[in-house]
């Protein structure tokens, strides 16, 4: 009797979904997300796509529109083969940091998975995108879609006008420098996004207006005096050393033509747009996983989803947060979902049921009571590196049984530097935090000098940390690309920072 | 405020990344071509028109970035799952591999870096195959074309479009059902109605007649009800003619591949010959539902072999071409009667044969082979240098000269000399032209 009653109150009771069911589920999820968790989100745009479209999205960084380049075709070819041969599955969703926040759901997902994915992407990731300081500071969720549209059209136009090979060679070279094409710490004064868009449009219109077929026979289309002067001024304002190679090249390269500068700029903007995501993998996934876990459990407690759906959810959730141990053949590093989720859950526990250890390690939040506020503060104001350094608790280190390894390439042995014990907690935490510091992993290469008046040599310096020099395998190829963009000699030196 | 909405994108056009794929194929063209050529050598004749998984060296499509050398400097890494380590323990690194202490992982990663694997579609594969052969576009298209199908009757179904309704079946079913359900017929009802009118026309009916009228009206009403319940035609009765796509031609062809495998035929020669056979096979496959391939190799004696042996094993001996023709005729008589099979013969040779044998060949061709063959193509494989020497069609090795004298009498005989892949196609030109006339 009571079972039939229960059934009628469920949001869904089959694996199949339709748009009506999706809407009901979304309403219920939204209610918990906004009124219970108090998330602050962009409007959601949820798109249902087929597996082939998912593959398409994979190959272009998950973006709904992207300029054309062979490397995306290459990734597509590989992903497609991997998928068709069954080597790898597809993600259940892709979510884009834009306003409105676009999330892709696969049509093959069961209804339970759709609910899980909506909670995960459209509320978890969405809240993180909107509130985290890195995204707020460095990315423009309102403008990204129109900017991509502009970039795609602009590059297509350049291909028509200057030929595929010309465009490709610039894009290839710029792609090689994407890791060195971001501002890490300080950004130069720049136009607001809206101004920038207007200026770009004006620039494109101007080019069209002044287009003259005779000019095409001239060796170089020069920029007009005004823009050249403006650019020179910007170049003079760059204080060396400059960490953003693409920015420096875009502004100061002696040989690039205006449209080529624009291409470099597009690639640089893409790199900058994706940079916060690289720095917040653990937090972003942790936040989204925590949110979906909380919401699905809440739905179950309110009697809105049945036992079967809950079992399916638990199965899927536990495989997402599964952390193989270091000697497991499946091990490939720390799973950001597992670590992020564990830390978020742990923060909640510290707020609600602190132990003595917690009180000692986290006096300001232990027993705080309002875990929602604590979590939201963490989501807003940290990135992986600082979050781990601040909030990784001894309990999580014990649960993961973490140990730190010191590895000197010159030695025949590696040393266990610290383990999850009283003496080792702080060192393990520092090491782990260091692993998420991109500054330590992406080679730190700076422009130290550029002789713009004389022989135009560009001098770069690689700041070496801990004796880790550049790999020779790719160095030459990348240097060739830089020279193509710079047009004159480029010198790369190793500088030992500690020395 | 409505914060969320859904969009169904599944119906959006597919192939969004097609442009990217074309750019990628163009980029890696040289490597892909090499891989395709390699796979041509390896794949069997009959698999020529399948898509193919190929792998190309990843260097050609590398996307280089600055990387830190994994073999230099000091690193600190945190791993989960400690079982027995204590602080200060020292663990020996595995002998080979990265400093991470994970030799296995480093090597598997390393392997996948060396080559890039992906799948070419059938179209892309054939395009690259054709490229070397310099086929005219029309021919390319017609080779890739999928066979035309005609719809043939294939029984009766319960679903279909109204135009395909089978009236006889439908009515027969309806009739049976009407009988089974005792649907009152119109005739029966008309009879009753007539009787009713008759009765009603009587000015003063007696009691019996009134009762009869009542009875008839009741009867008519119940019949009317029954008719509604058991209609004249019910959806259950409807049957449609079913049609099934069937290939237009169901004829069969047999293709005899004859090749000289004496020492003078090296790998290059065999490779060229293989492309020649492949092209013929593709062509035949398009025209015939069933294509059998027979491989006959010869030195001074001939034998039927499988494809593997045909292309890859070597044999030494003299060269007597006529033995291959004898063998071919023997196999043909045995298994492929001329009235059931279209017979195609493709012969590849370097042009040398024992003196006097050429005459025997021509005799065999004239008397036995040509009368039963649809088409006979002979290619002589030369060095590029030789091709220049033999610029005139009249000079050449013995076999060539003998065939020259014989060819004009037979329009379905083609001969050519090839030194490069693009020389192959002209052999077939006549064949395709003929086909075009047939189609017109």
Image (cartoon, coloured by chain):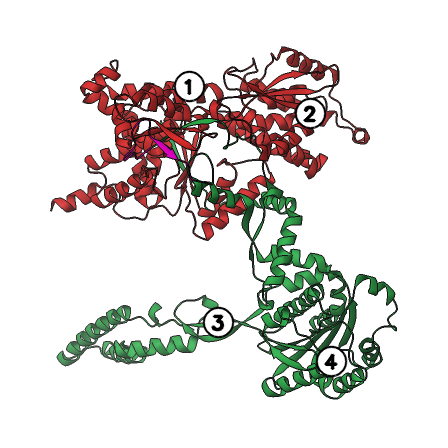
Chain colours: A red, B green
Q: Which label number is shown at residue B321?
A: 4
Q: Is residue A52 above or below residue A101?
A: below
Chain bearing tag 1 is A
Between label 2 and label 4, give the one nearer the viewer: 4
Q: Which residue is mark 3?
A: B243
How far apart, in angstroms, are the residues tagged by discs 4 and 1?
83 Å
- Where is residue B97? Give x, y as percent: 47, 39
**Same chain, marks 4 and 3?**
yes
* Residue at the (35%, 36%) spot, across then down: A118
Q: Is residue B357 above or below residue A327?
A: below
Q: Secondary structure at mark 4?
A: helix
Q: Residues within 10 Å of mark 1 (few under 14, many from 20)?
A: some
How far apart, in angstroms, are the residues tagged by discs 3 and 1?
65 Å
* Residue at the (32%, 42%) spot, across then down: A113
Between label 3 and label 1, give the one nearer the viewer: 1
**Same chain, marks 2 and 1?**
yes
> Taken as a whole, is the magenta stretch helix, strand or loop?
loop
Q: Residues within 10 Å of mark 3 (few under 14, many from 20)?
A: some
Q: Are marks 3 and 1 in contact (CB under 8 Å)?
A: no
Q: Is residue B234 visible?
A: no
Q: Is residue B138 visible?
A: yes
Residue bounds of the magenta highlight? B80-94
**Image side of residue B306 versus residue B267, left or right:** left
Q: Which residue is mark 1?
A: A133
**Same chain, marks 3 and 1?**
no
**Same chain, marks 2 and 4?**
no
Q: Residues within 10 Å of mark 4 (few under 14, many from 20)?
A: many
The quadrant holding residue B421 is: bottom right
Q: Which residue is mark 2?
A: A486
Residue sitting nearer the eye, A186 or B261:
B261
How far apart, in angstroms, are the residues tagged by discs 4 and 3?
50 Å
Q: Which label number is shown at residue A304?
A: none
């Amino acid at each position: 009797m009571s079972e039939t009653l229960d059934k009628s109150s469920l949001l869904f009771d089959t694996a199949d979904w339709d748009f009506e069911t999706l809407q009901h589920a979304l309403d219920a999820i939204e209610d918990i997300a906004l009124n219970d968790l108090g998330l602050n989100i962009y409007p959601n745009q949820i798109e249902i796509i087929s597996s082939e479209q998912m593959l398409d999205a994979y190959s272009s960084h998950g973006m709904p529109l992207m300029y054309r380049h062979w490397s995306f075709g290459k990734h597509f070819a590989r992903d497609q083969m991997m998928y068709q041969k069954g080597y790898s599955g597809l993600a259940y969703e892709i979510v884009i940091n834009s306003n409105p926040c676009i999330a892709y759901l696969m049509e093959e997902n069961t209804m339970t998975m759709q609910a899980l994915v909506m909670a995960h992407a459209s509320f978890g990731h969405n809240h993180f995108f909107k509130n985290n300081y890195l995204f707020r500071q460095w990315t423009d969720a309102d403008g990204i879609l129109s900017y991509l549209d502009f970039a795609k059209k602009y590059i297509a136009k350049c291909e028509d006008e200057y030929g595929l090979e010309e465009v490709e060679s610039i894009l290839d070279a710029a792609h090689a420098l994407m890791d060195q094409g971001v501002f890490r710490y300080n950004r130069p004064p720049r136009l607001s996004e809206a101004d920038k868009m207007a200026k770009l449009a004006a620039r494109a219109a101007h080019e069209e207006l002044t287009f003259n077929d005779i000019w095409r026979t001239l060796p170089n289309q020069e920029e007009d005096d005004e823009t050249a002067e403006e650019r020179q001024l910007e170049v003079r304002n760059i204080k060396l050393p400059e960490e953003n190679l693409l920015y420096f090249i875009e502004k100061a390269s002696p040989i690039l033509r205006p449209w080529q500068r624009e291409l470099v700029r597009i690639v640089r903007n893409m790199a900058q747009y994706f940079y916060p995501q690289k720095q917040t993998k653990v937090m972003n996934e942790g936040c989204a996983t925590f949110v979906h876990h909380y919401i699905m459990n809440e739905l179950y407690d309110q009697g809105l989803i049945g036992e079967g759906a809950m079992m399916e959810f638990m199965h899927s959730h536990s495989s997402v947060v599964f952390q193989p141990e270091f000697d497991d053949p499946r091990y490939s590093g720390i799973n950001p979902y597992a670590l992020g989720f564990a830390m978020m859950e742990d923060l909640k526990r510290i707020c609600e049921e602190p132990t003595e250890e917690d009180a000692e390690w986290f006096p300001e939040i232990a027993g705080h009571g309002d875990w929602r506020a604590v979590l939201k503060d963490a989501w807003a104001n940290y990135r992986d590196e600082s979050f781990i350094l601040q909030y990784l608790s001894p309990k999580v280190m014990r649960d993961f049984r973490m140990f730190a390894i010191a590895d000197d390439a010159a030695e025949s042995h590696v040393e266990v530097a610290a383990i999850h014990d009283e003496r080792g907690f702080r060192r393990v935490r520092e090491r782990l935090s260091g692993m998420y510091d991109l500054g330590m992993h992406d080679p730190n290469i700076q422009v130290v000098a550029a002789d713009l008046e004389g022989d135009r040599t560009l001098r770069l310096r690689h700041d070496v940390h801990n004796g880790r020099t550049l790999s020779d395998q790719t160095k030459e190829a990348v240097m060739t690309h830089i020279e193509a963009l710079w047009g004159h000699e480029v010198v790369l030196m190793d500088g030992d920072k500690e020395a | 405020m409505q914060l969320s909405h859904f969009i169904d994108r599944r119906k959006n056009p597919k192939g969004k990344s097609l442009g990217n794929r074309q750019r990628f194929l163009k980029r890696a063209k040289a490597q892909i071509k090499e891989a395709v050529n390699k796979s041509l050598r390896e794949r069997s004749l009959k698999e020529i028109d399948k898509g193919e998984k190929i792998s190309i060296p990843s260097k050609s499509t590398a996307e280089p970035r600055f990387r830190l050398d994994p073999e230099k400097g000091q690193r600190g890494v945190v791993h989960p799952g400690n079982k027995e380590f204590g602080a200060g323990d020292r663990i020996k690194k595995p002998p080979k591999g990265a400093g991470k202490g994970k030799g296995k992982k480093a090597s598997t990663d390393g392997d996948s870096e060396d080559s890039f694997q992906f799948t070419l579609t059938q179209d892309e594969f054939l395009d690259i195959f054709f490229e070397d052969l310099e086929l005219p576009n029309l021919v390319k298209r017609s080779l890739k074309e999928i066979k035309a199908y005609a719809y043939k009757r294939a029984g009766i179904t319960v679903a279909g479009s109204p135009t395909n309704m089978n009236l006889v079946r439908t009515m027969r079913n309806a009739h049976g059902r009407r009988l089974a359900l005792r649907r009152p017929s119109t005739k029966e009802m008309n009879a009753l109605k007539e009787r009713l009118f008759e009765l009603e026309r009587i000015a003063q009916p007696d009691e019996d007649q009134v009762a009869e009228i009542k009875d008839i009206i009741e009867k008519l009403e119940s019949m009317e009800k029954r008719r509604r319940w058991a209609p004249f035609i019910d959806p259950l009765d409807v049957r449609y003619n079913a049609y099934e796509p069937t290939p237009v031609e169901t004829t069969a062809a047999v293709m005899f591949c004859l090749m000289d495998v004496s020492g003078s035929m090296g790998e290059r020669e065999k490779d060229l010959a293989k492309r020649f056979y492949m092209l013929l096979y593709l062509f035949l496959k398009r025209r015939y539902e069933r294509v059998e391939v027979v491989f006959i190799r010869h030195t001074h004696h001939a034998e039927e072999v499988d494809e593997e042996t045909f292309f890859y094993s070597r044999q030494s001996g003299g060269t007597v071409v006529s033995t291959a023709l004898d063998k071919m005729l023997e196999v043909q008589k045995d298994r492929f009667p001329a009235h059931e099979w279209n017979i195609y013969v493709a012969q590849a040779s370097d042009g040398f044969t024992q003196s006097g044998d050429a005459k025997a060949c021509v005799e065999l061709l004239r008397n036995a082979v040509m009368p039963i063959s649809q088409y006979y193509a002979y290619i002589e494989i030369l060095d590029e240098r030789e091709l220049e020497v033999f610029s005139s069609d009249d000079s050449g090795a013995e076999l060539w000269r003998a065939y020259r004298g014989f060819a004009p009498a037979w329009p379905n005989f083609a001969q050519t000399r090839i030194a490069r892949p693009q020389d192959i196609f002209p052999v077939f030109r006549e064949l395709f032209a003929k086909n075009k006339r047939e189609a017109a």
